Amino acid sequence: MPRSNRPKRSKRDEPEELNIASVRFGSRRTESKRGTVYVVQPTTGRNAEEDKSWICPNCHLSILQGTSHLVAWDEVRGVDTRRHFHTTCWSKFQGTLL
């Protein structure tokens, strides 16, 4: 009989509890750009009000409701500086949030 290279699971290994908020809204992370630390969180935009849209501060184009994008804000100044970015625009963004 061939040897199995799969690790054997012990009965004590229990799956980790699923964090529903993390799955639904995406995982927050911090990123530093030009010395400013930003909190960045992916979102689907599905829970927004009807006919809601945002303007990306990098490309100045609309982000429509239901479009996956990122929300970023300055860690020091808080959520009052929160802005919605296209995912690719955030990776190119090097300015500061006003």
Image (tube, rainbow, N blue to C red):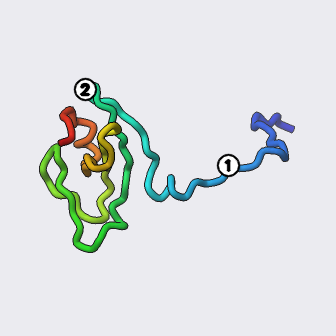
- At 76% from the left and 34% from the top, the residue drawn is 5
Spatial CA distance of label 2 from label 1 is 37 Å
Instruction: Give the amino acid at mark 1.
Output: Glu
User: Residue 39: x and y, percent?
Assistant: 36, 41
Percent across and percent down for residue 17 are 66, 53
- Compared to 7, does 17 lie above or below? below
Residue located 39% across and 36% down the image: 30
Figure quadrant of the C terminus: top left
Residue 1, image x, y percentages: 87, 38
Residue that extends furthest to the bottom in the rendered view of this protein: 50
The residue identified by callout 1 is: 16
Which residue appears farthest toward the front when viewing the image?
77
Residue found at x 20% / y 36%: 96
Residue 75 in the image: above or below residue 42: above
Asked if the residue at tag 1 contacts the one at tag 2, i.e. Cβ–Cβ closer than 8 Å, the answer is no
Disc 2 target residue: 34
Front residue (pair 56, 83): 83
